[in-house]
Structure formats: C-alpha cells, structure tokens
Image: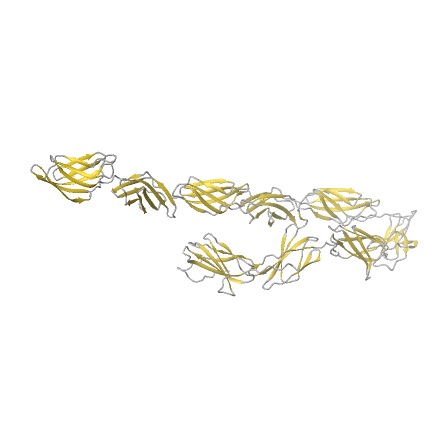
Amino acid sequence: MGVKKVGYYKDALSSDFEVSVFSATSKSAILRWTRVYGASSYKVIATPQNSPGNPVGYAVFGPHTVMGTINSLSPNIMYTFTVAALDNAQEILNIGTIDSSSAPEVMDPLRTVKSKDSKTFIVSFSLKTGATSYIIRLQNPNRFIRENIVSSSPAEIESLDPYTEYSLSIMSVNSGGQSQPSSPVTAKTVLPPPQLSASSPSNNSITVSWAPVANAVQYSLSLYKFAWNTTIITHNTSNTNWIVSGLDMGSVYVIKGFAWDLEGRQGEDSLYIDQMTRPAMPSIANVSMVMNNGSAGISVSWERDEGVFGSLQYHVMSDQNLTCNSTSSSCTLSPVGYGEVHTVRVSTSDEAGPSDPSGPVVFITFPCPPQSLAVVESTEASCTLTWDTVTRVNSYTAFIKRGDGAEESCNTTSRSCTYNCTCGHTYLMSVMAFNQAGSSPEGQVLNYTTLPCCPEGVSISAVSTDTFEITWTVSRGAELYQTRAADSSEVILCNDTAPVCALSDLSCDSSYSVVLTPCNDISGCNRACKAHTQITAPCMPMNLMLTQRNSSCFSVSWTPNNRLANYTVTASGDDGTRTCNTDGNSCDITDLPCGSNFEVSVIATSPAGLGLPSYSELLETGPCCPVDQVVDQVTQAMSNVSWSPAKGAHTFITSLTSTRGHARCHTMDSHCLMGCITCGTNYTVTMEAISHSGRRSNCSYEGFSSSACCPSGVRLYGMAHSSLRVHWRGAGCGHSYVTELVGSRNNYTCTASPGESSCDVPNIQCGDVYTVVVAPLTPEGSKVLFCAQRIYSVSCAGSNLGTVIYRGKRSVD
C-alpha cells in the first residue's frame, strides 16, 4: 500500500517519507517509516475508519527509530495509521498515512479432529466473521511445523505420517494478517494398513502373511469366498501370518485386514487381495499307447473337475523326461523310447499353484525362475537380495552387476543372498534356480539403486552475521541436497541441486545443528548422515549508556545479550581513537582530552566471529581550561581579567572571591572588566569554561591580591624653614607611602616608613601651585598609580613660606 500525504506544513512536505505496515496482530500493528532529517521524534496514531474522529491509541518514538508498535487495537477493524515527524518545537516536518486492517481475533480451539485414514485428519471448527480463510498449523513430535490453508469447516488435512501425534491449532486470516494461533489440541493418526500377501500351499488352505506394522499390538483379518456376501472366517492375531485350512479346492477367496494400536484404536483397512486355492488332485482314467506321424507316445486321460473357478492346466510327466500339458482331459507324452518303463503322473494347476500329483512316481522338470526379487540394505556396504521360494529346487545362483562394470555371483540353498554394495551405485540383479534337471531360464532382472552417499568435505562458514555458507564435495548418486539447520527455537531448510547452500536470517549467538541429506528420485534420501554444529556471530549490543566518571573518563554500559562474548568499545573523534575491552557489560574509556567530541560504539566478538556494531552514541568531554590567565588592576575598585583561548569553550564565567565580597562576569570574549574590587584584599581566582552544549569545566588559578588602599584625609601644612608637611590617614600600618609634589618649576618627593602618616618636604619654592599625590608602595617598591591628586597653592611671605591654600582634587588621568 502507498503513502498518502496529508496537508502542508512549513514548506512542501518531502515526497520520500514512506509509511508501511510491517505486520499486524489482532491487538497491535508494527509500522515502518523512512527517517526525516531534523526530526526529534515520531508520533504514531491509529484511528478506526468507522469512527474517524476517535483515535484509539498513539505512541511516540525517538529520532533514531524507524519502526514502532502501536497497541490497543481491536480485532478485524480497518484503521488509518498516521505517522508524523516532529521537530524540537513539536511542529510537524512531514506526515504520512496508510490504511490497514488489524488481524482477526484468536480462534476457538478445533472442535473435532478425526482420522479419515492413517494419513488424513478431518477437522471441524467454528467460523469467524470477517475471516477470508483459515490456517491449520500442525506440529509433529520432531517439532516440524506445517500449515494448511482451508476455506471452510470441515476440512481434510492430508499427507500426514501414520500413527503420529500432532499438535493442531487454527488461525483466522484477513487482509490485515493472521490471528494468533488458538490453543492447541492433540490428535494421533491411526496405524497404516498391513500389506497383505497370500499363497495357497495346498488345495484346501491359504497362507496370508504381512510385514510387521510399527506400533501394532494385534491384527484382525477377514476372509470371504468370492461371490458370497458373508464372512466365512475372521481371525485376530499378534503374529504376522495366518494359515487358513478347510477351504474349498480351486476356489477364489478375498482377504482384508487391519492393525490395532496400543490405545485400542482400529487402523486403516488394507486393500482387498484375491487368492485361489489349489485344485484337487486329478484322477487318471485311462493310459494307452498312440502313434502320431510315426512317433510313439503315451496317451494319458483323466476326469475333469467341472466345479472349480477359472481355467485348469494339466501337466503330465514321465520318469523319462517326457512331459505334456493340456487344458482338456488328455495329453500325449512323446517320443517314447523303446524298452523304457514310464511311470506316469498327472497333476493340475490353477492360479494358486499345482495340485498333488496323481501317480506315485515323481519326475522333476526344470525349475521355474525365482520371482519377486527385492533388496534390503541391511548395514553399511552390505545388501541382501531376496526372492520367493521356488518349489523343487536344490540351489540358487544370484548374479549381481554394478553400473561401473564390476560383477559378482552368489551360490546358496536359501532364498536370500548377501553381497557388497556401496552408496550411490545402480545394480542389475537376476537369480537362477537349479535342480537335478538343470537350471531354470533367466527370469526377472531387478534394477536397484542404493541410497546416495553422504557429502564429504563439509565446510560451514559465516559469510555475514546472520548467514551461513555451506559447501561440500559432490556425493555419488545425489541429485538433490536437503540442508537443514536447527537451533532451540527454529528450523531453516534449503533444497538445491548444487553442492553449496546459503542459510540466512539466522538468530545471532545461537548454536545450529546442520544436517546435509542427499536425495535422488529412485532410492530417496539418505537420512543417516551426521550432523555438524556451527555457532552464529554474537548479537549487537543494545541500549548504550554513557556515564561520566571524571573529566577524562567515561563509563560505557549496555544490555548483555550474548552467552559468551568479548566486547570492544571504540570512541572515535578528531583527537584520535580510544578503546577498551571487557567480557562484561561495561567498560571505562580513559585519557579523553578536554574539548573533544567522540562517536562511541560497541562490538561483540566470540569464537564464532565478529558481530554487528551497536548503534553509536555521541560523547562530548568538558571544554579545556585556559592555560594562561592575567589579572590587571585598572583602578582601586576595578580589575581587568584576560586569558588565553581554550579548546571547546564557548563562554567563560570568571569569579574573584574574598571574605569581603566577590566579583563575577560571564562573557564569550577572552577578557573581562570586573568592578567592585576591594583594595588591599586577597582574592581567589576561578573560572568555568562552558561548551556550546552546556558542558562545564571548573578552572582554578593563582590568587590575586588587590593593591593597598589610597590614603584619605590628605592635608598640606606650612612649616618653618621653608618646609611643608604632608599628612594623611592610612588604610593600614603595613605599607610605606610616597609623597610627590609637582610644581611648575620644581618637583619634590618624600617617603614615609610603614606605620607613619606624614612626611616633611624641605626647601619648598614658594609662590607656585603644586599637585600633591600620596600613594602606597607595593611590596616590589613601585607606586600605586591610581590614587587621587590634590592641588595646593603656596604663597610667599618675605623669604619664608606664606599661606598654603587647597585648590581642589582631580583623578589620575
């Protein structure tokens, strides 16, 4: 079924978004769809066509899923299935629909299962509304499963094995699929019919024999006289032969039989066979000499028996090797030599054989050729040729000629002969009988082909994770090869005429027993070939999970789904490849560099080979910390922090922290200007490097100490002897201060030791304006450059200093 586009979203929908129904049951359906670029999820909705506005179920699947199951369906309902591809904002990127029916509901178990004959069941069941057909599933004790499609009840299941118990279940079928199997019922076919054969050893008896029927405990036979409507004799026996005496001579009898099993069930009736009793011994009426064309002979006459069924053949013999045959009441033996004494005897025969001879002298003629030649392959390379017993025979010679020209013969007094036979050959066989008179003419020629040879050089190789390629040398006598691979849950078959076979769709991590059976049309299949065991590749690891242990180590875990396997975890990225190995279900990948992306997958190996790699997961390490960081104080309350580039970092959060407070900035640049800095304070410098995806790395650096605080309350006082005293209030007692007075004509400096708060500057030039700066000295002895400047004018009073006037304050440039 095709894909129907529904509506338009954003731009025109992609024409290659396809939706199909993979399979359906009575309560669920498995849908497949093509992947849509940019989709973050797929939403599946099922809506009954008989209630379009009332969806009965929906399911949501991740971006990497292209097959999913939707449940809560009702049996035998036509649904419209809709699959929508959604982006991160849950807007529809593409949408597709498909109409399909759910499978019918589960059938009731079969009502009745009866045996029609040893190879046929008649089953009956209740019909289901909406079902178009039904599947009868049968499983024999060897777990071989076959399925028959039927259209109505009752139905016949043919070609079964006799006396075999089957497990039967039924499934209904409609356009959407097939229901689950019903609860199974068990039934057993009846025994096959015995293959009857009969002969008449005397004129009033019949011997019936048959090959044993497997699992039979008793046999029932019935004998009818031809043209009569009633049974003359019935007989029950556990033997495989029956001798019936007291019968009418020269009469035709009809015989049938059946076997009983251990459960007391009657087996299938055999076919009727006919057997005639031998005729009565003739009574000689007259013996006289006759002449015929100058040749002497003995005319023998007898009384005909007109009450027998069918035609009679009379045979006259003398002790001088003279015989004659007739269907009338007389016969002439010729030529008769002179001076010979002949003892004459007459016998008659019908289809059952000859009667007892009438005369007391027995003359043995040439024997008949043996009939009913048959071969039994008794053991490997040994066959037995059998034939029916020929009366009045002293010995037999069997002649065996093989298809390649080899010949052998066998002399015996029994009715069988054992000879060497090898597989895959055709043999031509005949048997001659011998007595005092000589040998019989050549009779039946039996053409027999032995079973084909078992293949040699069997090689089983895994050409992929789910496929075996099996090769072997051509075996003699084979026209077809049956390849059967079975594990604990399934059987896979392959039939081909070539000495190679591929078995695919095998279950991963499973042990298969592979049997090659050679067959031909004449002798059938050789089912004595040994099995070969082969293990499939391990299963693909599933459900990968990544757990970060530290900045350079991630733990990779997965769901264990193999009996015995080793696993290799591979992380591949621009910074190379990292691996780890384990026989468990987790493994740590170490030495991962910062600021890097890796693609992680897991693959399983076992003695059977390499499995498929798992689906990949993306791994991102935290960004690198900047190698260099510099803090420069710009003003007494403001500092500039700069740093070197860092791999994988997109933004930075820089913090200066002390007991008097902290400062913080967040930027994409490699520098940051930070205010609210307290002078004379030790700060801890830290940084967070943040990647595009939000991964963070904590970075620590050498601490930063802000400069000593600038003094306050700076005053300038005139002193005697043209001196000025500069006084201030210091922020602490642990710093030295330098004072600078810069005038238009002269500059003056003085330095105060730690703990002092004033400094005297001698020999000041009066009548000038001075810029005065008092600043603390750093431990290295340099002056803090950002303390405020104050302006004073110093007047003259004669040769001495006059008034000192404060003119104001300005900031440092």
Q: How many marks?
A: 0
The residue sitting at the bottom extreme is 50
Residue visible at 37% across and 48% down?
692
Q: Is residue 686 left or right of residue 71?
A: left
Image location (x, y in percent) of residue 607: 55, 41
Quarter the C terminus occupies = top left
Visible residue check, residue 510: yes
Image location (x, y in percent) of residue 64: 46, 52
Name the colouring of the figure.
secondary structure
Using the image as rendered, state which of residue 297 and residue 77 is in the foreground.
77
Image location (x, y in percent) of residue 128: 61, 63
Q: Is residue 409 left or right of residue 67?
A: right
Using the image as rendered, state which of residue 581 and residue 559 is in the foreground.
559
- Quadrant for residue 24, please give it: bottom right
Q: Is residue 703 left or right of residue 189?
A: left
Visible residue check, residue 624: no
Image location (x, y in percent) of residue 716: 15, 40
Q: Is residue 154 left or right of residue 301?
A: left
